[in-house]
Amino acid sequence: MFYYIIKMVKNMNIIDIIEKKKKSDELSYEELQYVVMGYVEGKIPDYQMSALLMAITLKGMSKIEIFNLTDIMIQSGETLDLSGIEGYKVDKHSTGGVGDKTTLAVLPIVASCGVKCAKMSGKGLGFTGGTIDKLESIPGFQTNLEFDQFIDQVNSIGLALMSQTGNLCPADKKIYALRDVTGTTDSIPLIASSIMSKKIASGADKIIIDLKVGRGAFMKTLESARRLARTMIEIGQRYDRDVICLVTNMSQPLGSMVGNQLEVEEAYQLLKNEPVRRDFKEVVMTIATYMVHLGKNISLRDAKKEVETVLKEGKALEKFHQFIEAQHGKLEFDDLPGREIVAPKSGYVTRVEPAKIGELVKELGGGREKTTDQIDYRVGIKLHKKVGEKVKEGEVLLTVYENQKKLEDREYLDCFTIEKHSCIGERLIYGTVGEMI
């Protein structure tokens, strides 16, 4: 048997595997393992792996291929043993959206309700910002924690968040970075295997996934969101994990702020009970409610009451301060001066293009064009008007925070559609997959 496997691997060829997937043929476990581990070990170059990723994006994968790819990702490195943390460990993940800073507010709320949050996150992918990028915009904040330190912090304050380690799903970490710069970020098989391999390897018992759908998300339609949700739930079942997918709207940026430092400040405002956009607060409170519901095995109604109470009484804000201090951060920001851009005419905002907003922030330096790019954490955009709101000619539409690169007003204005008549707003939260109409 061992001789057969060695002989089979020797006979494999990356070009043949790419051609096979181009024809929509199913790749075996051994073929996927050969490619993934060959890429991790540097035996398969970026350009060949990029070709296979594009073939997968265009041709898709079968369920067994997705299950196998997820397993190979998990087996490529270590898995975390969170048994040293008492009680259920509940994790959350967002599939990415413009202005999506929910993790920064959700975790302190959930931890202050007594649910342990031991979370690993990644850097930005495509035109969406990563949670690690946002946290690293906080002066001094450390995202590279030793595992023992990570566990001790969760046991101490109920919350710790660190960047994905090199030993945890190293295959995913390397492929994830390549997808960011090769136009292969919107593939359901690649998204599902990437998310679930990290979540399973990270050791959480129960997982809430905020699955974004709309123009500013990787999933553009409810049907594609459903397919991704079902795929991730099925992967979770294979590993005895409870997975709930909450589908939320990303047809315009979430909240007011887009940009790493700006988004931290907006999350901080919510935790301080200062006024924030309704859409941002509603998504935060809904995700937090589901996490407390799972983590404490209580009804959604009781979980919602707890979430509202800790926010109102300032316990969530106190937890956020503990979290930032524990990881050596200081909430002292060096803000850039803002430049106001006004509406060219009167009317109602009927569309705000989230992908365009995200791309502009990336162009300003707030995201990556190449995996080696350095981020300017201070740049970004503040929206003063969103869909359905009335605006007068000459009224401030948005404020831009530029640094090294300046863009023309028209590039920002092209993200907005202003018409004479208002439009009917879309649903913000579609519900869990089983509840969706």
Image (cartoon, rainbow, N blue to C red):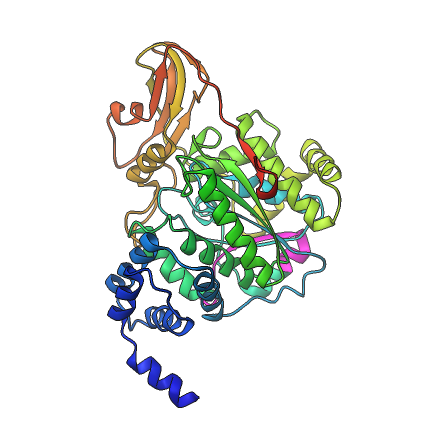
What percent of the width, then of the height, locates residue 230? Answer: 53, 50
Up-down relation of residue 180 to residue 339 (above or below): below
Q: Residue visible at 42% across and 55% down? A: 189
**320 vs 9: above or below:** above
Q: Quadrant of residue 66?
A: bottom left
User: Is residue 251 highlighted in magenta?
Assistant: no
Q: Is residue 377 visible?
A: yes
Q: Nearer the viewer, residue 350 or 226?
A: 226
Q: Quadrant of the C terminus?
A: top right
> Is residue 123 placed above or below 260 in the rendered structure?
below
On the picture, is 17 further left or further right than 97?
left
Q: Position of residue 210 (x, y in %)?
A: 53, 43
Can you see residue 269?
A: no
Please give the range of residues in magenta: 152-167
Which percent across, then down, holds residue 415?
A: 33, 26
Rendered residue at 46%/58% (across/down): 193
Closest to the observer, 414 or 153:
414
Quarter-wise, where is residue 318 in the image?
A: top right
Query: Could you tell me which residue is drawn at 47 percent across and 32 percent down?
Result: 254
Q: Give coordinates of residue 286: x percent, y percent.
A: 62, 37
Q: Seen in the image, is 231 located left or right of residue 16?
A: right
